[in-house]
Image: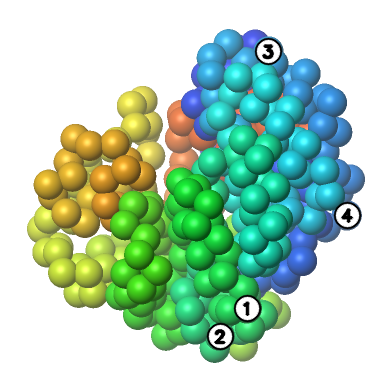
Amino acid sequence: MNYYELDPSENHFTDVMVDVTHRCNMTCKNCYIPNRNIPDMDIDRLISTIEKFPNRTMIRIVGAEPTVRKDLSDIIKRIRATGHRATLLTNGLRLANNQYVRTLKDSKLNHVYLSLNGVDVDDWYEKIDEMRCATKKIKALENLHKNKFVIDTGTIIVKGVNDEAPSRLLDLYKRKEIRNVLCRIKNVGKLGRSMFDDNVSEHKITINTNYTMDGLIKLISDQVGVSVDYIESWRHKPIYQNDDSEETSFIFPLDEKNVGKLLHKSGIWFKIADWNTFSNPDGVPLPNNKRRGRLTQDFKVAPMSEHVKLNEGGY
């Protein structure tokens, strides 16, 4: 495993995950940080740490679920005051309240990654995330669009449950008139709490039933109207520079006319990520990613996936 830690002044990651809380208002069956008894992050230390970063960085505000912190809007304001950018990664339950979304917008947040594992189907959410929450999820999406946020959606594909998610996502975007979005699709990863674990779910996931990268490509091709060859042509064209993980993660536009245009301002793009770690002896999804780091317990910066794996069951 290629693990290392950097002092903040030496940070080279363009995106850094900060786990502002380990608390959550859901109990999803796939959660890479299911450890709930960790104290909330000290925000004064967070700010003093990122102030030392040598370059402008995307601070990814994550949890478990960051919206359970009552001071989230203040956290965002303080991060933005350092000159860094900010993205919120959320299950979206609290974002069903438009006034709350407006509060986040007023704090100068403009980019949200919304988890939509069940798209608009309660049965899917119940099987994957243990909650019938489609109504709140869709309302959150509507509120983000209404308040002009940059939107990413994230969906884990569980074979035999939500296989039709790509086409339903496109239909949802169309119905809600969402024209610019990054649609993130991945398979089930064996990290933290996972549907690979027999004690987690009646819907057992094994190596043979989990989607491979090739399987995800075929699934998306069949549902969104582009060929496998077209998607494959993007597999070795990473949009991010200095990213060694393009074999397990890549991005492509639904419409080829948007090539060369700004992401999030040029239609619907897909990102496919392979979290199946069985071919990796270290059990790390998206290994050797030089773009995405994670703030450690000691306020150092480490590679995100490697740090999560080494601290599995702990931080």
**Which secondary structure, mark 2?**
helix
**Label 4 crowd (10 A; few <14 / some 14-19 / many >=20):** few
The CA distance from mark 4 to mark 1 is: 25 Å
Residue pointed to by mark 3: 52
Q: Which amino acid does label 3 sit on?
A: Lys
Of circles 4 and 1, the one toward us is 1
Tell me which label, 1 or 2, sits earlier in the chain: 2
Give how far across and how far down residue 106 sits, in percent.
66, 40
Query: Is there a contact, CB below 8 Å, between mark 4 and mark 1?
Result: no
Give, as a three-letter code, the residue at label 1: Cys
N-terminal label among 2 and 3: 3
| Residue for point 22% across, 69% down | 224
- Neighbor class of circle 3 (other Cα within 10 Å; few <14, some 14-19, many 20+) is some
Mark toward the start of the polypeptide (4 vs 1): 4
> Where does label 2 land, which residue?
122
Q: Earlier in the sequence, mark 1 or mark 3?
A: 3
Q: Which of marks 4 and 2 is in front?
A: 2
Q: Which mark is residue 37?
A: 4
* Front label number (2 vs 3): 2
